[in-house]
Amino acid sequence: MTTAVASRQRAERLRLLIQPLAVVALVGGVLTWAFTRDLDSIEQASINVPTLASATWDHLVISVVVTALVLVVAVPLGVVLTRRWARRAAPVFLGVATIGQASPAIGILVLFFLVSGLEGLWAAVLPIAFYTLLPVLRNTMVGLQGVDPALVDAGRGIGMSAGAVLRRIELPLAVPLILAGLRTALVHAVGVATLAVFVNGGGLGLLIDTGYKLSRVTVLVTGAVLAVGLALLVDWLGAVAETYLGPKGLR
């Protein structure tokens, strides 16, 4: 192991230790500031434990459901599009996913609402999942395409079926890139979930919107910092997964 690699690994481990502590300090400091202020009746209606807990929980539910949906769609689709018989269709699916990523998130949410007429959780989850699909799909494909063909041939040479080669060789080697894409998608999902308020999806965007419309800086800052803290926490969990869930030989 070279000195540069060892230094990079030490820096990453140090970041994994410091980041959650920084999140706790940031969120704890802002909540302490908010609860110790002289709040008026409007601010008290938003800045209280039940309301904050409910908004944070709704935000987390949206993010988790989006992540599950993206995993269920993007990873199998990425696997299929790397098979020889389906490679010609890959540019089409990547193009559609790129349109979702490149479009303004608020535009996708509003357009889906106008077309479907849905409100609530699924009105937020489905367009956000479309918006965050690209990183996982692309990284799944790149990870599988980057597997050394000699390893695949060796697996087939010892009698493994195509499915066994995929499960035991290709996917394990692609895991680091898939997790990196999932980490990016998660952070995007947490950020975009603040817009769920515009389709009655709940979440921390409700605090941000209320604080902005009613000129209550305390409410706005509290909602924004909670959303930032949740995004940083999700990013940290993704970094932990990347570090410890990949193949041992690649860590």
Image (cartoon, helix red, strand yellow):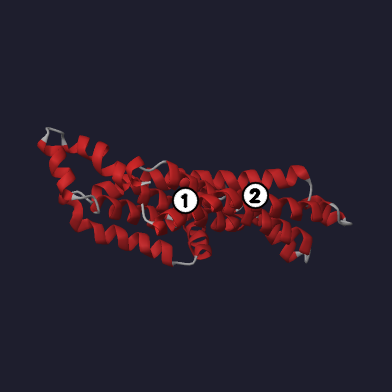
* Residue 40 screen position, x and y as percent: 87, 57
Residue visible at 67% across and 59% down in the picture: 224
Give the residue number, with chain letter if any, for mark 1. Answer: 126
How many angstroms separate mark 2 from mark 1 (CA)?
Answer: 33 Å
Q: Is the residue marked by circle 1 packed among few (<14), some (14-19), or many (20+) residues within 10 Å? A: some
Left or right relative to 115: residue 48 = right
Q: Name which residue type carries label 2.
A: Leu
> Residue 21: which disc?
2
Q: Are marks 2 and 1 in contact (CB under 8 Å)?
A: no
Closer mark to the observer between disc 2 and disc 1:
2
Q: Can residue 79 be seen in this view?
A: yes
| Residue that protrudes farthest toward the front in the picture | 3
Q: Name which residue type carries label 1.
A: Leu
| Residue that protrudes farthest toward the top in the picture | 159
Tell me the quarter of the picture where residue 102 sits.
bottom left
* Residue 73 screen position, x and y as percent: 36, 46
Left or right relative to 229: residue 147 = left
Where disc 1 sits, the SS reads: helix
Residue visible at 40% across and 45% down in the picture: 71
* Residue 160 screen position, x and y as percent: 15, 33
> Residue 228: which disc?
none
Left or right relative to 212: residue 172 = left
Q: Is residue 118 visible?
A: no
Give 207 or 123, whichever is nearer the viewer: 207
Residue visible at 52% across and 46% down in the picture: 237
The mark nearer the N terminus, 2 or 1, is: 2
